[in-house]
């Protein structure tokens, strides 16, 4: 099972489109950091995420003070406002695993470190490709993403909808 570290914005997208159970049905070991969890903990989606932690579908890395210090010292090209995104990047770098993020700065930094990185659109494609959801439902999820996250590339979403409607 392939390991994925995800940031909060992918969780928020997937929750908003109503696909969180399907997301955790994917054949991936989905993890995040306690810094990301803290961001979610402060939102109204906390209960949803906690249910997947209790079901052992989501694992939250609790960073030690020594690890937080390592994250702080971890050299990046781009400046990050806080430590949250940097914890995701550092953890993926340590574990040599993929990142899920919609954050452009984090995406570019991960790519510079040769870390595989994907976002919410990729998740929906994986749901369709794995047979967890039907293509028609996937197109509905793409449409919901257009409505709930205006920073996503509309042309790419339209291309994916056209691809899966065939």
Image (cartoon, helix red, strand yellow):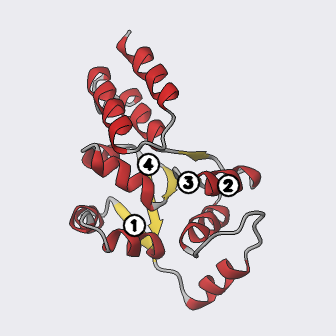
- Asked if residue 87 lies left or right of residue 6, the reply is right
Q: Residue furthest front?
A: 150
How many residues crowd mark 2 within 10 Å: few (<14), some (14–19), many (20+)?
A: many
Q: Nearer the viewer, residue 97 or 107?
A: 107
Sequence-earlier tag: 1 or 3: 1
How many residues crowd mark 3 within 10 Å: few (<14), some (14–19), many (20+)?
A: some
Vertical arrangement, residue 54 with respect to residue 123, above or below: below
Q: Quadrant location of residue 72?
A: bottom right
Q: Which tag is nearer the camera, tag 3 or tag 4?
A: 3
Q: Quadrant location of residue 162?
A: top left
Who's the residue at 51% across and 27% down the image? 156
The tag on residue 103 is 3
Who's the residue at 53% across and 71% down the image? 84
How many residues crowd mark 1 within 10 Å: few (<14), some (14–19), many (20+)?
A: some
Between the residue at mark 4 and the residue at mark 2, the CA separation in whole angstroms equals 19 Å
SS for tag 4?
A: strand
Residue tagged by mark 1? 59
- Check if mark 1's residue and mark 2's residue have beta carbons within 8 Å: no
């Amino acid at each position: 099972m392939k390991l994925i570290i995800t940031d909060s914005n992918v969780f928020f997208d997937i929750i908003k489109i109503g696909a969180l159970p399907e997301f955790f049905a994917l054949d991936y070991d989905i993890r995040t950091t306690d810094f990301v969890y803290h961001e979610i903990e402060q939102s109204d989606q906390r209960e949803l995420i906690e249910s997947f932690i209790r079901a052992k579908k989501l694992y939250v890395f609790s960073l030690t003070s020594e690890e937080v210090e390592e994250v702080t010292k971890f050299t990046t090209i781009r400046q990050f406002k806080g430590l949250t995104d940097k914890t995701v990047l550092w953890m993926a770098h340590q574990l040599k695993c993929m990142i899920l993020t919609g954050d452009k700065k984090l995406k570019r930094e991960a790519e510079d470190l040769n870390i595989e990185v994907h976002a919410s659109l990729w998740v929906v494609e994986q749901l369709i490709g794995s047979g967890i959801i039907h293509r028609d439902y996937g197109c509905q999820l793409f449409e919901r993403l257009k409505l709930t996250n205006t920073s996503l590339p509309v042309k790419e979403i339209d291309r994916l909808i056209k691809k899966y409607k065939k």
